[in-house]
Image (tube, helix red, strand yellow):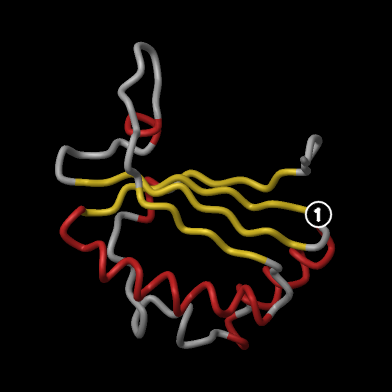
Amino acid sequence: MYVDGFVLAVPTDRKEDFIKHASLANSVFMERGATRVLECWGDDVPDGEQNDFRRAVQAKPDETVVFSWIEWPDKPTRDAALKHIMDPEHLDDRMNPETNPMPLDAKRVIFGGFEPVVSL
């Protein structure tokens, strides 16, 4: 398995817009081989003393932190999917910011790819 993880800040009053956007965009990942996608709306995200999720994405008081991940069967599947999805020749309207705009500031999204080391 391979996992892409994300933390982002979404304007709280745009929750439904985010759900609509994510549902459309994430369907592309599923079609390209992802086994599971989760978008989790922050419910209990405490402020830390040195760092926390809110500070990591510079969340404003009127924003909610979202924690998301995409599970892939392996890294080669993920790499092939991202190569295809990011290719301008294959731009899917569900991933196009003009037809499916992100209801958040994408510059404050943090993300990375991870190899699981413990799975229970």
Residue drawn at (35%, 44%) of the image:
42
Please state the horizontal and vertical placement of residue 12, each as a whole percent of the image. 20, 53
Q: Which residue is mark 1?
A: 1
Residue 55 vs residue 64, the one in the foreground: 64
Please state the horizontal and vertical placement of residue 53, each as a whole percent of the image. 40, 32
Query: Which residue of the protein is positioned furthest toward the front in this rendering?
Result: 120
Residue drawn at (58%, 79%) of the image:
28
Residue drawn at (44%, 80%) of the image:
96
Determine which quarter of the picture holds residue 35: bottom right
Image side of residue 84 versus residue 59, left or right: right
What quarter of the picture does the C terminus occupy? Answer: top right
Determine which quarter of the picture holds residue 71: bottom right
Residue 115 vs residue 81, the one in the foreground: 115
Image side of residue 74 versus residue 26, left or right: right
Q: How many marks?
A: 1
**Secondary structure under the numbered disc 1 in the rendered image:** loop
Q: Is residue 111 above or below residue 91?
A: above
Please state the horizontal and vertical placement of residue 77, each as a whole percent of the image. 80, 67
Q: Is residue 25 above or below residue 91?
A: above
* Mark 1 neighbour density, 10 Å: few (under 14) some (14–19) many (20 or more): some
Residue drawn at (32%, 26%) of the image:
46
Please state the horizontal and vertical placement of residue 75, each as a whole percent of the image. 81, 57
Image side of residue 3 versus residue 55, left or right: right
Q: Amino acid at mark 1?
A: Met
Determine which quarter of the picture holds residue 32: bottom right
What quarter of the picture does the N terminus occupy? Answer: bottom right
Image side of residue 63 versus residue 74, left or right: left
